[in-house]
Structures are given as C-alpha cells and as structure tokens.
Image: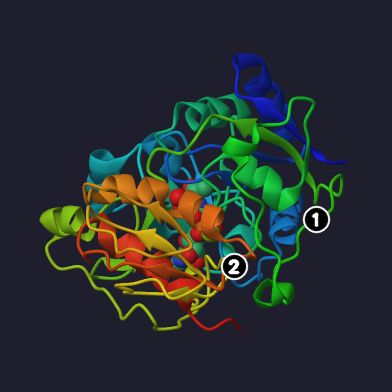
Amino acid sequence: MPAELVAATHESIERAARLLRADELVAFPTETVYGLGGDATSETAVARIFAAKGRPRFNPLIVHVPGLADAETLAVFDERARIAARRFWPGPLSLVLPRRADSGLSLLASAGLDSVALRAPAHAVAQALLRAAGRPIAAPSANRSGRVSPTTAAHVAAEFGAADPHPPTAAAMGPPLARNAGEGARGHRPRAGEGLGLAMILDGGACPVGIESTVLDLTGPTPALLRPGGVTLEQLTEIFGHIETSPPDENTPRAPGRLPSHYAPGLPLRLDAVNARPGEALLAFGPKTPPSFAEMQCLSHTGDLAEAAANLFLMLRRLDRPEFTGIAVMPIPDEGLGRAINDRLRRAAAPRL
Ligand code: TXA
Ligand code: MG
C-alpha cells in the first residue's frame, strides 16, 4: 500500500496516532526535518523503520517524547541532562543518555547500545502526534539511508512514494531527484505505489529549522558533540564550558550518522567554490554571486545562517538534476549554524562508498 499524504489536522493526527499504536509507520514534520516515526516500544515497528530506510542496523534511532517528564521514564538524567533539557526542549537537541533498564524501549532502536538518544521536538504537529500516540516514537529523518533529509512532505513522498488524491504543485515538489550514474548504486527510488511500508505522511508544511538536531552525548564525564545541528556549539559551550568535538571525518560507530558519505544528492558536490564550472549548478551564499553558472539557488542573500540552514536540503534537491554536471557550493562561515551546514555539505561531498 502506498502511503497516504494528508494535511495535518486534529482528525488526521488522531488517525496517525492509531496507526502508530498498530505498529505502522507515519512520517511527520518536526522543526528540524520530517521524521519517519514508529512506536519505539515495539520491535516490529522499529524493524520496519530500518527496513523502510534501508538503514544499517548498527545506526541507532532518536526517540521522541513530548518533554522531560516522559524522557525521565526512559533514560537516567543527571543534573547536566536536566539543565540541557530545561534550556533547549522542546527544540533541536537530542541527548544521548544511559537507557533505563525498565524503559520498555525496543533494543533495536538503540542498536544494542546501553544508551538512548532522546529529543522533545518543538513542532506543534509533532507534539500533538506524540501526545495522541501516548508512547515514545522512534524517528530517523524520513529519507532513504544516506540521502538528503526531507524538509517538506513532498520530499518524503518523493523518497517513499505516496498515493495522493490532490498531488502537490510542481513548484512545491521541486524537480525530481536526479537519476544518474552516481545515484545508481545507492539511490533506490520506489515506483509509484510501492510505498515501502510507510502508512501515512502528515503534511505540516516546510520545516522551519531545516537541519537535524544537535546530538549531544552526556554518558561520559565531558559532554561530547556527536552531530552539530539546530542548537549551536556556542549555545552548548555557554552552558557546559568545554565540549568534546572530534574531527568531522572521523568514522566511529559511536555516531554512525557521522559516516563520511551521508546526505548525498545524486550529483557530485564541489565545496568552497568561488566560481561555477561549465555545466555546474551553483549553491550560493551571501550577496555576491559569481556570474556564469547553469543555474543558481542562494541559501541566503543576506548571509543569514538560520535562513541558509532552512534552505539547505530543499535547494540541494532543486539543483540535483541530471542536466547539470555537478553542484558547486560557495564557502559558508564555520560558526553557529554554519557548522551544521558545513558538516552536512562535507558528507554530501564525500566519496561514495
Ligand atoms: O532532527 C532530528 O534529529 C531528526 C528529526 C526527525 O527528529 N531525526 C534524525 O534522526 O536526524 P537520524 O536517525 O537521521 O539521526 C540520528 C542520529 C544518528 O547520527 C545516530 O547515529 C545518532 O543520532 N544516535 C542515535 N542514538 C544514538 C546513541 N544511543 N548513541 C549515539 N548516537 C546515537
Ligand atoms: Mg538522517
């Protein structure tokens, strides 16, 4: 069965919650990206998430809850974790904490680790869905493993297929994902109607943050940044002082989302470009854009990093078309949200495995 694509309303959220309680998968908006949700207490639902995404089983999922009270039933919070949750929840911060023995969470959700990543999303639709479902929801980004994260419901439909009596306009969809040699090995696109086990896509519009949550590991003595995201390193440092960070290309199983090649479009990416080469499309940043590119999308004309983050995945998808030879990306300052943007761009540019 292809997924049903519906506007998020009180009624459709209730229906989505019933599907979740029946081990079905529902894609839903969060302030960061769309999530592919399943009941985190059900091994069946969690196994379906891994299957639908084509995700390696060593890569654990983030478990979503309405807030701190629910989170404390799933993981052991120390004072640092409570401070972080009170300051940044609901919001784009995932905390990796020791999993409680009586959490009831699927072991597969944590990929067999004795920790769990928890997040309380700020998006009103996500909050309403979590409360209606009445159980923790595991939700990775709603894209096929290794590919660009979805920031609209149409992106999710493009990844997984959907049946829709009122298809979104071409403008809302953006152009289809490129199908070229680079994509062939990894980029499975379902045929219309294939559905891949996703029951429903709740459309709540474009995600305002546009880049995934920051993953902060609080299981060790020093807080460690596993993935830069919507909460900046500067904001965390202000609270915790020193934060452990590791080189972005380090490949550790501790945060498999940091695998070198990830978030990959079909076309090759060329970073820190000052000019586009013939045939290349340009992903620009700032007021000064070089001339002579085949096509351009500008992340932010004013150089605003929050605007750039919100546009990043959408514009990568728009430029990912077979008529171009590649995507040239202008330099983006490596500070604040720029760190998360550059992290995703480096992975999108990394050699494909
Ligand atoms: O913004 C987000 O975080 C989105 C929305 C849907 O909430 N979700 C998301 O999930 O980005 P996903 O599965 O694409 O990324 C989860 C990241 C991965 O890098 C994973 O390795 C890491 O979190 N992670 C999850 N559980 C972990 C754990 N127990 N220890 C270390 N890393 C963990
Ligand atoms: Mg992801």
**Callout 1 amino acid:** Pro
Q: Which residue is mark 1?
A: 190
**Residue 92 position within the rendered picture, expressed as x and y whole percent measured from the top left:** 36, 46
Image position, residue 272 (x, y; %):
31, 74
Residue 187 in sight here: yes
Count the marks: how many?
A: 2
Which is nearer the eye, 342 or 330? 330
Position of residue 74 in the picture relative to residue 93 (left or right): right
Q: Earlier in the sequence, mark 1 or mark 2?
A: 2
Residue 277 spot, x, y in % from top left: 43, 76
Q: Residue at 69% across / 26% down in the picture? A: 6
Residue nearest the observer in this picture, 335 or 85: 335
* Displayed quadrant of residue 273: bottom left
Residue at 27% x, 55% y is 337
- Per the rendering, the mark at residue 84 is none
Q: Residues within 10 Å of mark 1 (few under 14, many from 20)?
A: some
Q: Nearer the viewer, residue 172 or 263?
A: 172
Q: Which residue is mark 2?
A: 146
Q: Which residue sits at x=56%, y=64%?
A: 60
